[in-house]
């Protein structure tokens, strides 16, 4: 039975300093490289959580991973971007390494735990998982935190609140990536096995404690996140988009599939292969002994890793690239290093203090040397010397297992792990391709400089965007495309991409003419070229583009232009309309000749849609009409009209409101209820509130209805808002837009 003393202060300080082994000469491992998509997407949520969740990108699975997004949002709210990046990524890494150390100090001893922590901190896959903004680093940290808490709960079974915290960590783990749901049951099973082996507590009692305390922790965190999400976008069940995305992925073949065989076994699987072999040997050697003490922990860690490898191997075989992509295979790291901790260092507890300190010093120096040899001048980088280096590392680790109870075994293990680490320092998938590459960034601080430049550009965009929709327009064949790609990805890439073929493609994608367009180009004429092309596209909406900002970005290759163009209404092309109702409730839309500003339509003409149950409600309130839709998904709430178009042309209808909860749709429908003519479900800021607006092409005498409907696309749940005004305008036909284009 292990003791439950606190971590010795010197060990705690040493563990907190371990990231310096990697960072002493470079800091690229703390920044997201340009050219990826998902990490920059999460950075966008960190910087604009409320507007992304509520207005711009509601219902995306990225935004449902609150156990990762909320910590990132809090850190980025407290610090400037550069400091926030350091705090967040170092924080995630330190949670992971402290949790690993805490778990292993109970099960293998404090010396073996610290040696494992050294190897773990220097592991390239951990550095990149915790050093970018993708969710895999958070998952590793939450998994190891839950393991540490479960281990402590097994050590001190009377402290049930530890199980409560473990339940919260376990829920946070699953909410960081739904794939963890398949692996999460291994953690409570580990607790059952460990607590039974150490205390012989009846299994039924342990199961009851898990259900009560661990379950309470899971429920508590779920309720907390649900409440926060309700305040953000009006939906309690925040994880619905992730579940829906997983269902869609299971129904189709994965387009990102990659084989695990690239110049041999993919290098990010070398540590997993080593630990898997050690787990088999450990199981074989220890099954003959009693399942008590450290022997029990070794059996449990080995069983966990082999189970995870078997499951992920099965998924890889059926076309899900959980091993073929390095950022998915990083989910193996907690289980890999627990096996490494219990397999390679049993001799550490027996050697003298002086000898142990010298070995730790050697380990720190050699791993620091690997990361200090930044360009690979001394030690090779994969795949340049895969055969001699990888084989030498594998041979050293095999001998280390044989000599695991001798000091020579510790030194051989350090040598083997050093060689494997040196090979895969910079492994990644090249942007836009399936090519696997292992090349150091241009300088030791290149990614930091990229991050600072991109964040500066983003801050300039935000100062102009003011919550409005955004589109990006650039040419993907220009040298600075990775910058363009990263900045675009902070606004969810495809969701905000106008065209990657500048100066062509201005009208190829439907855009919100109430938003902004960011043009990125090496051509100094780009702002005027873009203004002319967008002017032709937007003329049919009574909108004109205005160049709001032009910045020169000092990229290392060659400077490029970032121009931000804002859409502004052109009142000379818009005629406001009013509604004249007859006794039957039908209204003729008539031009208002004396005004250029929209004239509000009477709000008292809205009527409730008949529902069999859960009727919508509306009532007069200060500043407008308070509306609540039915709870049923996509159910109709209110109807206005029918309205009659006075002449052929293009019309715009807008609803200004103040949101309260949920999401709704505003649009025009055929009077025979055969479908929608046009809708808006996203909207944009308008004064102190928001506005939903749509354009529709109508013929003279055509009748139609205005309609409000629930638009809670993640399940049942009512939307509520204060409707302030509804307006209508007709576009004065410019040259070339007189024909109807429904």
Image (cartoon, rainbow, N blue to C red):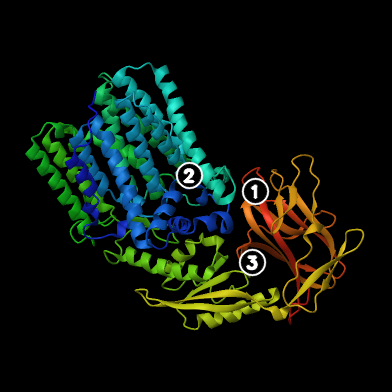
Q: In x, y percent, where is residue 509?
A: 62, 67
Q: Write down the residue under mark 1.
A: 712
Residue at which label 3 appears: 510
- The residue shown at (73%, 47%) is 635
Q: Nearer the viewer, residue 254 or 548?
A: 548
Which of the pair 227/702 is nearer the observer?
Answer: 227
Question: Which image quarter holds the N terminus?
Answer: top left
Instruction: Return the residue at label 2.
Output: 320
Residue 243's place in the image compared with 54, above or below, is above
Left or right of 521? Residue 13 is left
Mark 1 or 3, nearer chain start: 3
Give the spatial CA distance, label 1 vs label 2: 30 Å
Alpha-carbon span between mark 2 and mark 3: 33 Å
Q: Earlier in the sequence, mark 1 or mark 2?
A: 2
Quarter of the image where the C terminus is located: bottom right
Q: Nearer the viewer, mark 1 or mark 2?
A: 1
């Amino acid at each position: 039975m292990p003791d439950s003393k606190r971590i010795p202060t010197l060990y705690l300080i040493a563990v907190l300093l371990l990231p310096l082994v990697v960072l002493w000469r470079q800091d690229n491992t703390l920044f997201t490289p340009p050219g990826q998509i998902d990490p920059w997407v999460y950075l966008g949520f960190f910087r604009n959580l409320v507007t992304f969740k509520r207005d711009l990108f509601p219902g995306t699975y990225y935004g449902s991973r609150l156990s990762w997004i909320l910590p990132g949002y809090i850190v980025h709210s407290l610090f400037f971007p550069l400091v926030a990046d350091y705090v967040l990524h170092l924080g995630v890494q330190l949670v992971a390494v402290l949790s690993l150390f805490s778990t292993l100090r109970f099960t293998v001893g404090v010396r073996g735990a610290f040696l494992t922590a050294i190897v773990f901190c220097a592991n390239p896959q951990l550095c990149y998982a915790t050093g970018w903004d993708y969710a895999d680093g958070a998952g590793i940290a939450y998994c190891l935190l839950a393991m540490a808490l479960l281990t402590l709960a097994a050590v001190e079974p009377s402290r049930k609140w530890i199980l409560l915290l473990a339940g919260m960590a376990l829920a946070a783990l699953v909410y960081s990536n739904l794939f963890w749901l398949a692996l999460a049951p291994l953690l409570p099973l580990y607790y059952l096995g460990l607590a039974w082996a150490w205390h012989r507590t009846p299994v039924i009692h342990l199961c009851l404690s898990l259900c009560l305390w661990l379950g309470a922790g899971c429920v508590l965190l779920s309720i907390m996140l649900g409440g926060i999400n309700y305040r953000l976008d009006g939906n309690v069940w925040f994880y619905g988009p992730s579940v829906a995305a997983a269902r869609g992925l299971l129904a189709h073949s994965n387009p990102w599939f990659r084989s695990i065989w690239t110049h041999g076994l993919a290098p990010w699987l070398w540590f997993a292969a080593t630990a898997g072999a050690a787990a088999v040997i450990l199981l074989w050697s220890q099954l003959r002994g009693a399942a008590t003490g450290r022997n029990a922990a070794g059996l449990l860690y080995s069983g966990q890793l082999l189970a995870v490898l078997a499951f992920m191997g099965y998924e890889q075989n059926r076309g899900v690239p959980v091993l073929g992509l390095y950022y998915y295979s990083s989910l193996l790291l907690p289980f890999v290093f627990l096996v490494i901790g219990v397999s390679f260092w049993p001799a550490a507890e027996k050697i003298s203090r002086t000898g142990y300190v010298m070995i730790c010093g050697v380990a720190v120096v050699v791993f620091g040397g690997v990361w200090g040899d930044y360009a690979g001048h001394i030690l090779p980088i994969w795949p340049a010397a895969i055969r001699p280096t990888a084989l030498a590392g594998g041979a050293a680790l095999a001998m280390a297992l044989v000599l695991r109870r001798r000091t020579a075994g510790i030194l051989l293990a350090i040598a083997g792990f050093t060689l494997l680490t040196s090979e895969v320092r910079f492994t990644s998938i090249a942007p836009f391709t399936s090519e696997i590459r292992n090349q150091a960034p241009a300088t030791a601080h290149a990614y930091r400089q990229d991050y600072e430049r991109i964040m500066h550009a983003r801050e300039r965009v935000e100062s102009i965007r003011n919550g409005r929709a955004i589109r990006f327009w650039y040419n993907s064949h220009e040298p600075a495309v990775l910058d363009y790609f990263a900045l675009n990805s902070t606004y969810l890439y495809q969701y905000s991409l106008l065209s990657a073929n500048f100066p062509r493609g201005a009208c190829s994608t439907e855009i919100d003419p109430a938003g902004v367009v960011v043009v990125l180009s090496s051509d100094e004429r780009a702002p005027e070229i873009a203004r002319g092309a967008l002017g032709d596209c937007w003329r049919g909406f009574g909108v004109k583009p205005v160049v709001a900002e032009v910045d020169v970005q000092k990229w290392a290759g060659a400077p490029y232009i970032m121009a931000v163009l804002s859409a502004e209404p052109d009142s000379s092309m818009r005629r406001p309309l009013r509604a004249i109702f007859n006794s039957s409730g039908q209204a003729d839309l008539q031009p208002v000749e004396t005004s250029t500003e929209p004239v509000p339509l009477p709000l008292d003409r809205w009527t409730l849609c008949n529902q069999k149950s859960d009727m919508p409600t509306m009532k007069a309130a200060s500043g407008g009409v308070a509306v609540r839709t039915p709870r049923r998904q996509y159910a109709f709430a209110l109807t206005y009209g029918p309205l009659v178009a006075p002449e052929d042309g293009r019309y715009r209808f807008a609803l200004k409101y103040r949101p309260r909860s949920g999401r709704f749709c505003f649009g025009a429908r055929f009077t025979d209820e055969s479908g929608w003519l046009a809708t808006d479900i996203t909207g944009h800021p308008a004064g102190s509130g928001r506005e939903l607006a749509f354009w529709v092409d109508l013929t003279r005498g055509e009748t139609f209805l205005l309609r409000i409907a629930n638009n809670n696309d993640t399940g049942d749940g009512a939307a509520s808002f204060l409707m302030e005004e509804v307006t209508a305008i007709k576009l004065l036909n410019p040259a070339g837009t007189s024909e109807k284009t429904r």
